[in-house]
Image (cartoon, rainbow, N blue to C red):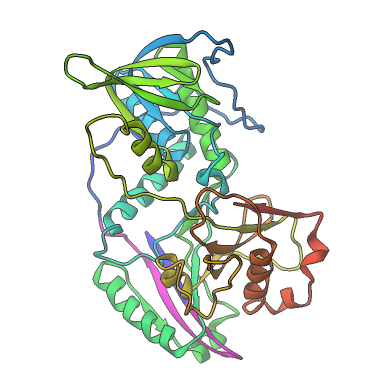
Amino acid sequence: MASVTLHIQSPPLNNDVVSLPRNHFPIVTFKTTFFGSSLTANGKPLSLPKTFRTQPVITSSSSSSSSTHTFDVVIIGAGIIWLTIARQFLIGSDLSVAVVDKDVPCSGATGAGQGYLWMVHKEPESDTWDLTMRSYKLWQMFAEKVRAQGLDPLQELGWKRTGSLLVGRTAKEAATLKKKVKRLSEAGLRAEYLTSDALRLKEPELEVGKDDCQLDAQRAVAFIQKANRHFSIKGRYAEFFHDPVTGLLRSNSSSEVEGVRTFKNTLYSKKAVIVAAGCWSGSLAHDLFRESDILLNVPVKPRKGHLVVLENFSSFRLDHGLMEMGYVDHLHDALDRKSSHSVKVEEGQTPSVSMTATMDTMGNLVLGSSRQFTGYNTKVDESIINHIWKRTGEFFPKLKELPLEDFTLDRKVRI
């Protein structure tokens, strides 16, 4: 079922609202075993430890001599995509799987993101609509499977139905949201547009649908990783972390890829080598095939973002995830210098900043967000942090009364 709310805010109090009551998402048909098997080990439901472990099942050798291992599938990358691909092979086949990464799980975008599972800002019939719908349904099924095991998805995955409010501030954005409601309705969602007066009349009893969701990536990764590791007992799963891939192993006769060479190991693959390295996939693929006769261009490059996390925030509470309407446009145009929400931080680099806000399962306020192309730079930029705070204050007046400096000890920044 789907229930999404699009909320328009025109200063000072002229708010229009688009409300999408509960309704079924269009049916997405697919065949998968990822969520078809119980998450058990030796007949017992799996439970997540409170601390996130990063020790590999097979510890890579620290000596100069290289160790050699053979698996059916070798996966490069240790984010949420690697995790689910590995899980699919492990429970849906008898193949053995090795995972190799230059770092550890959640060290990249997986660990830094807000964990949004939202449909509200997606466009029906876009290139990513069906893929997003499939992903959304898979995570819902996974949460229900965890619940069926007698476990709490909130505790194990940080999973909760937050609902979502898409907030706008201009007449142009209001018109855009009206069109969006029409498109969402045509895609199978039942949408309703509420004026600001209607919202104020209903606000005391207003029930905002909570079918858009979010999760805690670190908890979700640790939970599924623990399930994967039970297959290591059978010799079907291994992890090689802090061990960057340095090259491909290719057959002398056919030139086919037979595996990968890492800094510490040689990993042969009988079936496939899968690159799931996130924003590093493009440069990695280029480097791996640089000395071959294959011209491979993977159009993937890193886009940097800042999120501000205020721990144990108590000034107010959010029951839904919020995102300003401008986020939809800025998401696709991080270098638009004409944007009224852009701020120049470095010569030649102009990030866009849009308000996003949510409360995580620990009661922390997570604010964002910025987008800029600066390569693989992960240095915190305080000017962007200040801009995020200022932008958020335009939507939450209480934050204008609170200097950001007051949160120095309780503030974290995700890059």
> Who's the residue at 78% across and 54% down the image?
410
Q: In this view, does 168 lie to the left or right of 403?
A: left
> Who's the residue at 67% across and 66% down the image?
383
Whether residue 295 is visible: yes
> Who's the residue at 52% across and 36% down the image?
221
Please name whichever residue, 244 or 147, is drawn nearer the observer in this view of the structure: 244
Q: Residue lying furthest left in this view?
A: 254
Q: Where is residue 51 in the image (x, y as percent from the top left)?
A: 66, 32
Quadrant for the N terminus, please.
Answer: bottom left
Q: Where is residue 333 in the image (x, y as percent from the top left)?
A: 42, 68
Q: Position of residue 65 (x, y in %)?
A: 51, 8
Q: In this view, does 79 lie above or below 233?
A: below
Q: Does the magenta stretch include residue 14?
A: yes
Please name whichever residue, 325 or 361, is drawn nearer the observer in this view of the structure: 325
Q: Position of residue 126 (x, y in %)?
A: 26, 63
Magenta stretch mostly in which secondary structure?
Answer: strand
> Who's the residue at 36% across and 65% down the image?
122
